[in-house]
Image: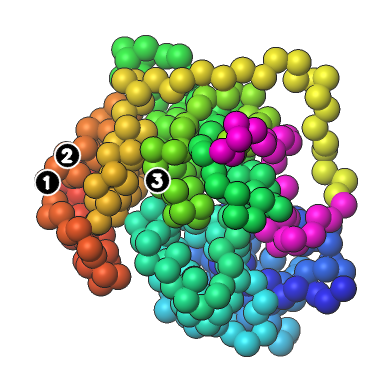
Amino acid sequence: MEEKRVAIIGSTGSIGKQTLEVIRHHKERFSVEVLTANTQADLLIEQALEFDPNCVVIADKSQYLKVKEALASTDIKVFAGSESIEDVVQMESVDIVIMALVGFAGLRPTLKAIEAKKPVALSNKETLVVAGELVTKLAAQNNVPIIPVDSEHSAIFQCLAGEFYNKIEKIILTASGGPFRGKSKDFLAKVTPEQALKHPNWVMGKKVTIDSATLMNKGLEVIEAKWLFNLDAKKIEAVVHPQSIIHSMVEFEDGSVKAQLGLADMKLPIQYALSYPERLKTNFPKFDIFNYPNLTFEKPDYEGFRCLGLAYKAIEKGGNLPTIMNVANEIAVESFLKGNIGFLDIANVIEEAMDKYNFILKPDVNNLFDTDNEVRRELSSLYLK
Ligand code: MN3
């Protein structure tokens, strides 16, 4: 079996670290070609010394010398600046790119990787939220697969294996409901960042954890699913499933429903994205059906968790509205984590931005970057002081 050479964009984040754990278990199958970090130089150095990549990128230029010196005795090349990330994803020697950046920052390197005809294992959902139409079109033109890493989308992807041209009737996208499932509005109004950062089932980065608590994560995932599987958003139903065992389901035209089950462990979808279409044996903890005699399902609370409805609204109108929604959410989450706004204000900030900013029905990439810039600048000055 040929070894796959992997570029991990965002190797010091939650998905990046778990990707390295998968590779550590399958050294005969995967090697690390590129590692990139935003600011965590020490961890990047440690990872580089263990996995011996061809090159590393530290996006924060002020830490270039530190990384360079620490790796001076190796032949690992060191680059700095986020522009360098756009270069390294195109390297001849890269077989697959794991896009594990968080937020809008994932868009540019994803476009570059696709243009260079690199298969992309996509963990960054914001890329498809803001530019799903452009990204999927570009991928089709370049004949490049986008393989989902997000657990729900990996589940759908797995359910669709072997179905070829069979039509999807509906996708049932499961959500854990987050730490505040069933809580009243009065309770939600007083939620602190510390409470919101405790997710019951999944270990994730801060942004995703808050998005899970507000259900915006599910909203982003509805949009992500729409583009990955080429469906009308009306055919994607978000369902609360607190045990996080069924990672999503697909209903076909004949009424048959397929589901993918497993423990809530991101290493599984990460590994599947890397090894697809093969499955590799693992010694990770396995799902035991008798530990979960009750798998339950509920409708989401659209009143208490307004972000989910806002996401449906954004995708229905389309254009640059999902971009406005996404950046407003990024700023609102950061503002909430700083203690500047309350938990329920997150949806208010997003809704206000969606009503306020200039709507463009058919945006090109530059329109999307401009929209992101403008909204980010204005909302940052309002909410991130
Ligand atoms: Mn998910």
Q: Residue at x 46, y 20 (%)?
A: 299
Residue 232 image label: 3
Residue type of the residue flagged with mark 3: Asp
Other-residue count near label 2 (Cα within 10 Å), few / some / many at <14 / 14–19 / ≥20: few
Which one is nearer the viewer's eye here, 105 or 337? 105
Callout 2: CB less than 8 Å from ligand 1: no
Q: Are marks 2 and 1 in contact (CB under 8 Å)?
A: yes
Residue type of the residue flagged with mark 1: Lys
Residue type of the residue flagged with mark 2: Glu
x and y, in percent, of residue 48 in the image: 69, 71
Q: Residue at x 60, y 55 (%)?
A: 165
Q: Is residue 150 left or right of residue 23?
A: left
**In terms of secondary structure, where does tag 2 sit?**
helix
Is residue 166 a member of the stretch shown in magenta?
A: no
Other-residue count near label 3 (Cα within 10 Å), few / some / many at <14 / 14–19 / ≥20: some
Which quarter of the picture shows residue 156?
top right
Above or below, comparing residue 162 to residue 342 in the picture: below
Above or below, comparing residue 347 to residue 87 in the picture: above
Above or below, comparing residue 298 to residue 261 in the picture: above
Q: Hey, which residue is sitting farthest front in the picture?
A: 254
Residue 191 visible somewhere in the drawing: yes
Is residue 275 a member of the stretch shown in magenta?
A: yes
Label 2 vs 3, first from the N-terminus: 3
What's drawn in magenta, residue-wise?
252-281
Label 3 vs 1, first from the N-terminus: 3
Dot 1 corresponds to which residue?
A: 356
Above or below, comparing residue 215 to residue 160 in the picture: above
x and y, in percent, of residue 113 in the image: 52, 75
Which one is nearer the viewer's eye here, 171 or 337? 171
Dot 2 corresponds to which residue?
A: 352
Residue 377 visible somewhere in the drawing: no
